[in-house]
Every structure is written in C-alpha cells, then in structure tokens.
Image (cartoon, rainbow, N blue to C red):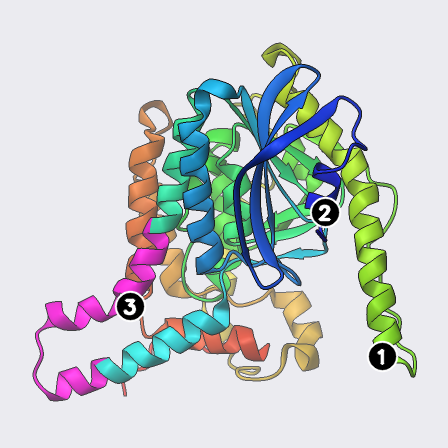
Amino acid sequence: MNGPLRLIRSEEIPGLKNLDALFEWAEGRAYLAIDRVVFNGNPGAILCYYNPPVHQVGTPGLLAYLEGLDAVIDSLDEIRFIVLSGANDPVHSGGDIKESLNKLRETLKAKEQMEREGASKREIDRLFSWGEERIRKGVDLYRKIRSISREIRVIGLCGGGTRYGGSAEIPLMCDYLVADSRSGICFSEVLIGIIPGWAGIARVLTKAGLPDGECMSKTAREVKSNDLKRVGIYNEVVNVPYPFPKRKRTDNPDSDKRQYLEALQHHEDLTGRILLPRALHVATCPVSEIPKRDHAGTNVLAPKEDVDLEVQRRSNPDNYSHIWGKPLGEVRGEIDKLGRPLAPQSIEALNELFDSYEESEFNEGLFVEQEMEADARLYRDPRFMEGLTAMLEQRVPDFRLHTD
C-alpha cells in the first residue's frame, strides 16, 4: 500500500513487529488503518491516516477516526500505547472548504425560501445544523482520545509540513507530540470567519498557556517546529535534513507525475525511518525521559501587546478597503505589510472565549464545550460566506457586515 503504511507494515524499523490490523478503512486513495504492533517488547498500536494530496480530514475520514478509536477502546487491555501518524508532506489541510461552501450555499437558499414562507427563527436556525454536527464529531474525537489517554500513552507524530484546521487539532489531542523539523501549525480559521472548534485552543492552553493560545488563534500565524517546542506544544523535534520532493515540468507530464509519485514514496520511507522510531521511543520510555517545558514562564511566541496591536489592525475591514476583492498575488506587497485580513466576528468570539479563561480554575473539558459552541454560532454569520469564497478564490475578503 502507498503512503506511510507501507513502512509501518514492513520489517524495516528495528525493534518494531507488526502483528495484525485492528481496524481498516479506505475510500479512493484515502485510508485509515490501525495496526497492533510490538516495539521492543511493548505492545501497542499505530494509527495511520493518509488522504492525498493535501491530507484533508474530510467527513468520511473523521467518521473512520471515530470508528477506529472505538476498536482501540475495545482493545485497551492488550496495548500500552498508541501512535497517531500520517504522511510527511508539505501541507496537511483541515476540512474541505468546497464542501462547506456548497453546504452553506444550499443552506442560505433554503433560508431565503423559509423566510418568505414565514418560518420561525428556530426552524431556520436548524438549517445550519450540518456545521454543528461536524464540529461535534470533532469534539467526540477529542473525548475518545482523551479517554484513551487515561489508560495508555497517546503520541501524536507530526510529519513534515504545515498543519491547518483539523489536521492540527487532532495531534494536539494527544499526550505528547513528536515532530518533523520541517513541520508547523497554523490556526487559519480566523481568516475565513470561524475559530478552531475541535478542542485546538483548549489543548494549546493546556500545553502552552494563555498568551500562546491567543497568539495562535487570533493571528493565524504559521508557527514552526522549533517555536512549538520552545513553548511546550511539541515535546520533541526530530531533524530531517532534506527538502520535500518537487515535481518536474517537462514536455512529458505523464512521466513527470509518475516520477513525482515515486519520489514522494521514497521521501515518505526515508522520513518515516527517522520519525517513527523516535515516536515509538517516546511511546515506551519512562515518562521522566520525555522532554517537557513548564509554560508558566515568560517563554511565549510573542508579547501580548504586539499581538493585540496586530489583531486590532488586521480585524478592521476598512484598513483593506483599497484592495478588497483583489487577487492575493497581485497585492502581495500590501498583504506583507498589513497581514491577511482577520474576520472581525471571529476575533469577537475569541475575545469572549478568552475572557472566560481563568488559569487557576481551568477546566479543559468545559472550555472545549464553549469553544465548540462559539465556533458553531459563527457558521450562521453572513460574513462566513465571504470568508469561504475569498479563501477559495485566493482574493482579499471584505469582512464588513452588509445589511442590504
């Protein structure tokens, strides 16, 4: 099988013995497999999710995660750890934006019809339940992983590339994170008008504290591996000393594609031989040997004052009035200077969420519920359509609240 599962099921990792498949799901080129393994005498499992080309966590994949983790829960007496792994590619996307846009268009069309027919606000509000149901499934995934973590050790293996949306939030649900030195995390939701809703903010608060939770969720900055380790989100960063493969462009596109896919698989195998043993070591070593950082200190991603000023500037739609609707590529200089626009409604929701945070009384599970509810409400904001279409069209959004 292509992708990272080939290595997991080989005999090429010293000390690793693959026993059998605990769970398997596939749809097209995407798959999720959970294999029972033994590493240096320690019984465990490896979950492998693969969904090329940008590894979106689409609805079918999310449902497969939930079903697969039920199989893990049924086997907890037989294993001591689980590693959540995936591909080593430049991009790990979140949900399918096109799917969300189509759903939203259908919803708004139905909403208009129901308003003409005099439907109640409650009936109209139910039209948006598709967004809430998906968010709730993500939170169900969080609950399953945290439940498993009370019984066995749960490791997130962050392969190379930047992780967005659900692809960032799922590894954050784990106890410990082992990462490719080329990897990073970006909470990009605020660029389209929602917020992380799958416990991502809560987990950053637990792992790194309030300043970094605010910085990551409000600015949509891409945070690289060394900074993530510095603030306590990553436990270990493994150096990968070579770049991602690049596709050649010749007069033979079929050959170019074939060679590129072969290069990706070779890269996958090479990188997996570096990363997987480290994740397995963290999964089985004494807890005292796992690197940790106390986030109570002053080691933060950015000073709060700088973050507040940046967010205030970027969340004011009028600061972008001269470039509304223009392709991002045409106004790169302005975007480099101003930063990409932030959705004001997302910032308002985040401010309310963080106002409720008290470190001494922090209840992660309760905060996750609040995070989920705040995200679901934003699906109903009319500016969400503008954020989605602008992201797909790669243009500058106009986040003013239009009432006409």
Gap between marks 3 and 1, in whole Å? 44 Å
- Residue at disc 3, secondary structure: loop
Gap between marks 3 and 2, in whole Å? 34 Å
According to the picture, the residue beneath numbered tag 2 turns out to be: 160
Where residue 233 sits: x, y (%)? 58, 33
According to the picture, the residue beneath numbered tag 3 turns out to be: 380
Q: Is residue 155 left or right of residue 150?
A: right
The residue shown at (66%, 73%) is: 334
Identify whether 26 is placed above or below 287.
Answer: below
Q: Are marks 3 and 2 in contact (CB under 8 Å)?
A: no
The residue shown at (29%, 35%) is: 366
At label 2, which amino acid type do we have? Gly
Residue 226 visible, this angle: no
At label 3, which amino acid type do we have? Arg
At label 1, which amino acid type do we have? Pro
Q: Mark number for residue 253?
A: 1
Gap between marks 1 and 2, in whole Å? 26 Å
- Residue at disc 2, secondary structure: loop
> Label 2 neighbourhood size at 10 Å, few (<14), some (14-19), many (20+)?
many
